[in-house]
Image (cartoon, rainbow, N blue to C red):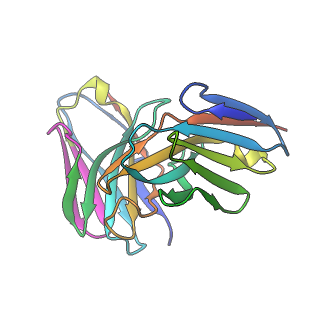
Amino acid sequence: GESVGLHLPTLSVQEGDNSIINCAYSNSASDYFIWYKQESGKGPQFIIDIRSNMDKRQGQRVTVLLNKTVKHLSLQIAATQPGDSAVYFCAEVVTGNQFYFGTGTSLTVIP
Amino acid sequence: DTEVTQTPKHLVMGMTNKKSLKCEQHMGHRAMYWYKQKAKKPPELMFVYSYEKLSINESVPSRFSPECPNSSLLNLHLHALQPEDSALYLCASSQAGGLVDEQFFGPGTRLTVL
């Protein structure tokens, strides 16, 4: 399943499928990006980050892709599990002293 | 201890009340943050303390007053709040003061202003 974080705030995927959550940003001075996961009733939890001089970074079951040309960031979750159900926020740091969360995408994993 | 704790979990206050939110971490982090999060919205950064000094104030109204008594504690003093200030208030900490450091969040205090 795939979503555009700013325009389709919900995403439903079958357990075991891959998920793609997208995020668009507007500031070309953004130099650092982070993905956070927020489960119901909890604070955001760091998932993975990427600096603007990179275009891909991989973690455990997650990959972040950065396309600076079109100012687009995506989070790919492999083999999505029920425990992945949460709201996912991208966040950007601009010139090291401004920090913004994106709108967020709600991911629901169907068992 | 890799937790950020926040108290109270829930708070209901009137517009004339004075109350405080508390945040604590024992990870040796030197930066602490306050965020405000309305329902179904992303968190919005309010304040950043770096090495116990206020380094970022995102034009927050003066009815919110942060305080960092030491590197482990962060308070948010509330006075004369408005109903629109009702929200989840999140505290976070990071190793150093830069916004590029991984932030560890607490569970938040759910504030209702009547």
Task: State left or right for residue A99 relative to residue B42.
Answer: left
Residue B7 in view, yes or no: no
Task: State left or right for residue A23 relative to residue A1.
Answer: left
Q: Position of residue A65 (x, y in %)?
A: 61, 51
Q: Give A54 or A64, whichever is nearer the viewer.
A: A54
Q: Main secondary structure of the magenta part?
A: strand
Extreme residue toward the front, this view: A69
Q: Quadrant of the C terminus of chain A?
A: top right
Task: State left or right for residue A8 relative to residue B65.
Answer: right
Residue A37 in view, yes or no: yes
Q: Position of residue A70 (x, y in %)?
A: 52, 39
Q: Give B79 or B45, whichever is nearer the viewer.
A: B45
Residue at image location 14% in from the left, 39% down from the top: B62
Depicted B24 relative to depicted A110: above or below: below
**Magenta span:** B58-77
Picture quarter containing residue A11? top right
Q: Position of residue A46 (x, y in %)?
A: 54, 56
Q: Position of residue A14 (x, y in %)?
A: 83, 37
Picture quarter containing residue B5? bottom left
Residue at image location 41% in from the left, 72% down from the top: B26
Task: State left or right for residue A5 relative to residue B63.
Answer: right
Q: Quadrant of the N terminus of chain A?
A: top right
Extreme residue toward the left, this view: B62
The question of residue B18 being in magenta is answered with no
